[in-house]
Image (tube, rainbow, N blue to C red):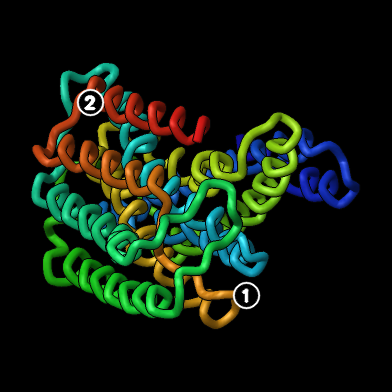
Amino acid sequence: MYYLAAMAPVALALKLSGSSPSLVFFSSALAVIPAAALMSEATEQLSSRSGAGVAGLLNVTFGNAPELIIAFFALLDGLQEVVKASLVGSVIGNSLLVLGAAMVVGGRHRTRQTFDRTAAQTHSGLLLVTVIALILPAVVVLSRGQSLPMVGQPRQSFGSHIDHLSLAVSIVMIVVYAASLLFSLRTHRDLFAPARGDKRAGHPWPLVRCVVILASAGALVGAMSELLVGSIEHASKSIGLSEFFVGAFIVAIVGNAAEHYVALVVAAKDKMDLAVNIAIGSSAQVGLFVAPVLVILSFAFGPAPMALVFNGYEIAALLFGVLISTTLIADGESTWFEGVQLLGIYVLIGMVFYYA
């Protein structure tokens, strides 16, 4: 599959020549596959050296970097509601689609899979903090008699008070996320790197090689994701998809394609600790780091500050999606049927967003 890397220059050439968006989409999608495979192998190699916690963190960091870049350029264009939809889509996509698919793939030939319960409860807490922080500004808006954003509008102003509240909430979220890194990587690192007797053939890759490959693959995914998103946006107009649905589902799935692939591969190899770290860790990173960073950047570079006020559909998706995912991982065990439940909720939310 690594020969598919040749599709990257092909996709770029098609984009520059003004070819059909469909051709650009399929060629750039094929180019993401070898990058995702590289990220998968580097993540597993790093996991054998540093544990699932460090490997999962680096994977989601390099995997979310393209999404942060894409969202930043969308902010510069004033598409704040599209950015917020993509953030919500990433949170529910990782906690429902990725985790659910990992449970199904990993549980096909196994009665159950296990992962560290304490680490899972920590992830559940982070997800709940994420949801609370993201919906609190909307509570203030509603209590003051203002309306939530409408589907389809590019940007809505809520006043300087809500903008400053969003900035303050963002700072607190970043502090909480930094504390979670300290907890998982330093003071309680043993909880996130349990010894499960994983014996790999041969010698693991050097640490520098793992990080360089992750960074390089992440850069390729970022470049191809930009082409994918551009082609999807043009194609969506011709087939009648709303930008709200595109931002919440298609852009979110494309922007996290590499993480999706890695989580499925490691789950199939019965490494659910790493799969859960990637899926839930990515959701928490999007909510507690990517979203606050975008709010801060909007004050400095955007045409107007981006308030952390989501519409009713997005709030419902966050609440219901995180509720079921945190409930199912709390016991430290998973089955294929639990994965089906997560995927079912994701499809239902997608149907609501499609008809919104």
Q: How many marks?
A: 2
Residue drawn at x 50%, y 44% is 248
| Other-residue count near label 2 (Cα within 10 Å), few / some / many at <14 / 14–19 / ≥20 | many
Q: Nearer the viewer, residue 56 or 124?
A: 124
**Which residue is pictured at 42% across the width and 61% down the height?**
61
- Most distant residue in the front direction: 145
Residue 247, how many percent across, how many down? 55, 46
Q: What residue appears at the point 75 percent right and 33 percent down from the top-left corner?
A: 238
* Mark 2: secondary structure: helix
**Closer to us: 330 or 109:** 330
SS at circle 1:
loop
Give the foreground label among 2 and 1. Answer: 1
Disc 2 from disc 1: Cα separation: 43 Å
The extreme right residue here reads 17
Q: Can residue 86 be spotted in the picture?
A: no
According to the picture, the residue beneath numbered tag 1 turns out to be 303
| Residue 252 shows in the view | yes
Residue farthest to the bottom?
300
Horizontal side of 194 relative to 26 (left or right) equals: left
Is the residue 18 above or below the residue 110 in the image? below
Instruction: State which tag comes first along the sequence, 2 or 1.
Output: 1
What type is the residue that disc 1 sits on? Pro
Question: Which of 352 and 117 lies nearest the eye of the viewer?
Answer: 352
Q: Position of residue 101 (x, y in %)?
A: 36, 30
Residue 249's disc is: none
* Image location (x, y in percent) of residue 296: 46, 77
Residue of label 2 = 338
14 left or right of 130 in image: right
Along the line of sight, the residue nearer the viewer: 117 or 47: 117
Query: In which quadrant of the rendered image does the N terminus lie?
Result: top right
Where is residue 85 drawn, in percent x and y? 49, 50
